[in-house]
Image (cartoon, rainbow, N blue to C red):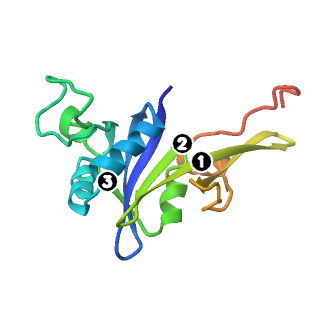
Amino acid sequence: MFYRSTIANLQDDGSVEAIRLYFDTDKSNTYAILQNDYVTQEKIEELLNLGDLMWLGRYIGSENPIYRPSSEICLSFTRDDFLAGMDAEIFGTMESWLRSFYTCQVAYLFDGKDWLRFERIDSERKLNEGIEVLGYWVNSMGSRVTEIFDFATRSKLMGAQLTQPDPLTKK
């Protein structure tokens, strides 16, 4: 199973610089790679400069891994597939970063000295017009770090519809 994740760095001014990791196959392995191989500010900045990733490896790598594939080297949409518009994004606060990455299941944040891991929790609320999907982010201790947010409202802003008919009543 694949997870979509986000990897971020907390800046001195409280803002957050973040990228997406599209194929996070093992949350514990990703966390271990970040904790063991990306522990300096310079290394994290180098990682974020790659932009959105298909794959997180232990090494940044400088060659195009499509021609020399290795699970040890990061695979970047920008560097390796030559796709534009997949650069790191800056968010004003940690909460705005997490709320913007509502399609991700896991979030990793370097706070200047340690990696923190967050997981998105989903729940449903039954409405007259169907079921509404709600969510919020929790830290590794299970404490909620964002307010509950509504995926349907978020998706409408993005032009999609997430409210689904109730499977029992078909409404």
Q: Is residue 164 left or right of residue 117?
A: right
Earlier-in-chain disc, 3 versus 2: 3
Q: CA distance from mark 1 to mark 2?
A: 5 Å
Tell me if label 1 and label 2 are in contact, CB under 8 Å: yes
Name the residue carrying label 3.
88
Q: Position of residue 76 (x, y in %)?
A: 25, 38
Q: Please name the residue that numbered disc 2 is placed on.
A: 105
Q: CA distance from mark 1 to mark 3?
A: 21 Å
Dot 3 lies on which element?
Answer: loop
Residue occupying image coordinates x 37% and y 77%: 13
Query: Residue at the spot x=28%, y=37% of the render?
Result: 57
Is disc 1 placed on a helix, strand or loop? strand
Kind of residue at disc 3: Ala
Label 3 Cα neighbours within 10 Å, binned few <14 / some 14-19 / many ≥20: some
Secondary structure state at the residue bearing disc 2: loop
Front residue (pair 29, 70): 29
Amino acid type, label 2:
Gln
